[in-house]
Amino acid sequence: MYLNKTSAYRFVTDKHTILAVWVIMAIVAAILEWDSNNFSIFRGVFWHTTEQKSLFDVYPQEYFDTNHYGPLFSIIIAPFALIPRWAGLVLWNVFITLILYWSIRKSTFDQKQQVFIFWFCTNELYTALALSQFNIVTAALIIMSFCLIEKEQDIWGALCIVIGTFVKLYGIVGIAFFFFSKHKKRFLYSLILWSIATFIIPMLLSSPEHIIEQYKEWYLSIVTKDSCNTFSFYQNISLLGIVRKVTACATYSDIWLIIPGLIIFILPYLRFKQYKNTAFRKMFLASVLMFVVLFSTSSESCSYIIALAGVAIWFIAVPWKRSTLDIAIIIFVFIITSLSPTDIFPTYIKQTIIQPYALKALPVFIVWIKLSYEMCTKDYKGTIKII
C-alpha cells in the first residue's frame, strides 16, 4: 500500500523527525533510569582497568551482577566514565542511539527502506535504551560491517567486526559477509591487523600483564554465564530458551539445536548465482541479525533491537510485493516480540506465558525460518518493491 505524500507523511518520514524522536527517547530513558545498574557496570570496566582490578569480580558496593564485556570496552566507555555520572549516562544513551541511527542512514538501504527500519525498531530501541544496552551498538556494527563491505570499504568493515567481537563476541557474525567481499585478501588481513590492535589498545589504560589476564578471565566468565543462563527468567530469551523452558529438560546439549540452525543458515550460500543480486545479499544481513539472537543463551529482552532490525530488513528489502501472510507475520512480531515487555501488553499473558517460556523469540524464529526458505527457493533479481 502506498501512502499519500501529505504534510503529515512528509513529517513522519523526515530524517530530522526520526532523529529528534530517537534522541529524545535516549534522554528520557536516561532520566527515568537514573540509577542504571548497567551503566554502573560499564563505568566500572574503565575504572577497574585503570586500577588493574579484575573486570569480572563481584563489586556489591558498586553494582549488582557482574561485567561480561571484554577489556576493549574500557576504551569505548572511557569518555563517559570520566565525567559526572549523570552526564555520562545521558551522553552514553545519546551516543549509542546516534551510532545506530548513523549506521542505518549511511547504509545501502534507500530512504523508504530506512524509514521503515527506523520506525519498526523504535519501540525495541527504547527497551534497550532503558537499560543503556550495548546491544544497540552491536546492531549498528553488524549493519555497518555489511554495508562497508558492500561499498568495498573492507578495511573499515573488518574494524566493525573486530570491535563487536572484542567487546561482546556477537560482532563475530559479521564474518558471514566474507563471501560477498570483492577484496577477500584485504578483508582477511584487515581482520588480523585490527584484532592485534584492539587486543593491545586496552593496555594503554593498564598493563600488558593485566590485560592478558583479563582476557583469560573474560573467557571463564562467558563459560560460567552460559551455564547460568539455561533456565534464567531474564536470559536465554532465544530459540534455545524456548525449547529448554518449554521442555524443562536440563540433560541435553544446545548443540543439538545449534547444528541444525547452522545448516539452515549456511544452505543459502550454495545459491552462488544469487550472489550478484543486492536483495539476496541484504537477506543475509537480515538472517545474521536474527540468527545471532535466536541461537545465543545470552539473549535477553533488550537484545532484540538486533533481531528486530533483521525482521525489518527481511520485510522491506525484497524484489517482490509482500503477501498478506507476510504482513500478518510482521504484525505478529511487533505485538509479541516488541510490545510484550511493555505495560500496554496484558500483564497476565506476559507473566504467565510469554516470559516464562521465552516466547518473545518465537515470532522472530518464524520469520527466520521463512526467510531461510525464501533464500533457498526465490529469485532475488529485480527492483525492490516497497510495501
Image (cartoon, rainbow, N blue to C red):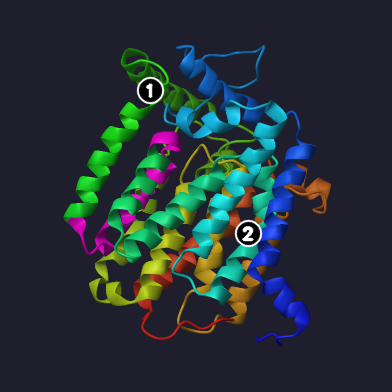
Q: Count all numbered tags in the image, as a single digit.
A: 2
User: Residue 234: percent from the left, percent from the top?
Assistant: 64, 35
Answer few, some or many: residues within 10 Å of disc 1's Cα (few below 14, many 20 plus, some between 14 and 19).
Answer: few
* Residue 219 or residue 278, whichever sits in front: 278
Q: Which residue is mark 1?
A: 204
Magenta-colored segment: predominant secondary structure: helix
User: Residue 341: percent from the left, percent from the top?
Assistant: 73, 47
Q: At label 2, which amino acid type do we have?
A: Cys
In this picture, residue 120 sits left or right of residue 278: right
Which residues are the magenta region?
166-184
User: Residue 121: percent from the left, percent from the top?
Assistant: 63, 59
Quadrant of the frame with the N terminus: bottom right
Q: At label 1, which amino acid type do we have?
A: Leu
In this picture, is 182 found above or below 252?
Answer: below
In this picture, is 58 found above or below 326?
Answer: above
Q: Earlier in the sequence, mark 2 or mark 1?
A: 2
Residue displayed at 47% across by 16% down: 50
